[in-house]
Every structure is written in structure tokens, then in C-alpha cells.
Amino acid sequence: MNKFIDSHAHILREYYPRDKNEVIKNSENTIIIINGVDLESNKEILKTIIKNDNTYGALGIHPTEVNDYELSDLESVFESLDNDKIIAVGETGLDLYWNKDNFEKQKEFFVKHIEKAIEHNLPVIIHSRNAEEEVYEIIKGYKDLKSILHCYGGNLETAQKFVKLGSLIGIGGVVTFKNSYQLQEIVKKININNLITETDSPYLSPEPYRGKRNEPKNVEYIVEKIAEIKGEKPNKIKELIYNNFVREFDLK
Ligand SMILES: [Zn+2]
């Protein structure tokens, strides 16, 4: 039986200090990939995925966190990539919105994540903020790389370039917002086989919960919106996205 897919969430005690376990339990019809952002969260993820069947992990250091680390710190993170429930590398990428000054360092970290992803035959989950062209220029050099552009915020033309590379375009709660014309257009024009759903919990709650703390179970509203845009039944979209997930992450 297929499930909803939340390919990007941060289900960490930091954001769910009182009810982290309940949030996961309440989302039992959703497969959740919890994404690491720093050393501490990566460790927490390894514990969470043992205890909860519907959770998987992605390990990495977020581009806005790289100033706190050296490249060698990644070694301890990547030691756990052979764990069966670690199914991606990330969250990694480039962020030119919060920080332009350390662009070279961000690039070094990003490339290291990419190389590890290829070595372990895992997809890489990419954060790109105001940096779509820069990300594209880097990943197009890696033919065997599987990639997900998480919470894609670029334009349609660049999305189409990513799709040509085989990337999946991550669609989150923003697509349900009234004036997200650009993203809705992307969902309309890009083939469903190239899309994947996510919540980015605790951020970016979809309508009707916009502004509130997000949870993986809200991915349902994102599926509904994609279905509306595509003129399909939500169940059909759910099934197709599930198939994309199984294919991308090589799960049986
Ligand atoms: Zn994230």
C-alpha cells in the first residue's frame, strides 16, 4: 500500500520539545525523511529512525551552518551512511540569501556531500536559496548523481534544466499559498514523474495551517493542491509520488 511522502522534514526535539514522538505517530501514513543540518541533529536522527518504522534519515551539514565546522567534521557524519535507514545525503547546498561571504566554503561542503552521495549511491537533498544557477553549474558535472531540489524556489526554466539532469523537484507548502504563481506554474508544467512532496516541517505549513508549526501529516494538503493543479485525483497523485520515492531511493 502506498503512503504519503514527506521527503524533507526536521523532526527534532529542538522544534518538537514536548511531542516529537506524537508528531511522528500522527504521521504514520507518511514516510518521513528527517534531514540533518548539524552534528547534533545527525546524531538524533540515527536514534529516531531506529524507533520509528515510518522514518528514514538524510545526513549532512546545512549550508547556513558551515561556518561552525571544518570539512573534516563531515567524516563523522558520513560514517553512518551505510545504515539501511539512511537513504540520502543532506541537507546540503548553497544559500546566497543568508550568507554570501562564505560562498567558497559552502561550495566545498556541497561538493563533499555530492562526492559521498555518489560513492554510496544515495540521492543528495539540496537546499538552494537564491542560488539555483550556481547549484546547477555544480551538479551538472556529476553524471551519476541523483538529486532532489528541496522546496524548489527558482523559476520554471531552471526547473526544466534540473529535470533534464534527472533531478526531482521538491514541492512543499508554498504551493498552497494564494500568490505562489511561479511554483504553481512549475507544478503544472513539470511532469509528475519529476516531482516529490515534502513539508520542510516545522516550517512552511501549507494552507489551511499557514503560519503554524508544520507536521509531516500536512503533506496531504500539498498532494491535494498538486492534484488540483494537474486535474487529477489526489489518490492518483499520492500513488505516483510514492512511485517516484521508491524509484529515487531505490527501495523495494
Ligand atoms: Zn531543511
Image (tube, helix red, strand yellow):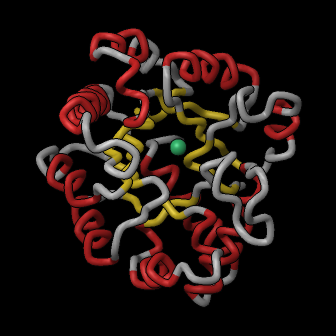
Q: Is residue 36 above or below residue 162?
A: above
Asked if residue 94 lies left or right of residue 5, the reply is: left
Q: Is residue 37 above or below residue 163?
A: above
Q: Point out the image quarter for the N terminus.
A: bottom right
Residue farthest toward the left in the current orientation of the protein: 141
Residue 3 x, y percent position in the rendering = 70, 54
Asked if residue 33 lies left or right of residue 78, the reply is: right
The quarter of the picture where residue 197 lies is bottom right
Q: Is residue 217 above or below residue 154?
A: above
Q: Which residue is more in the foreground, 175 or 193?
A: 175
Residue farthest toward the bottom in the current orientation of the protein: 231
Residue 133 x, y percent position in the rendering = 21, 60
Q: Which residue is more in the foreground, 220 or 205?
A: 205
Residue 11 x, y percent position in the rendering = 69, 35
Q: Which residue is more in the foreground, 39 or 80?
A: 39
Res. 191 visible in picture = yes
- All told, the count of numbered labels is 0
Q: Which residue is more in the foreground, 59 or 81?
A: 59
Q: Is residue 212 above or below residue 107?
A: below
Residue 174 x, y percent position in the rendering = 59, 68
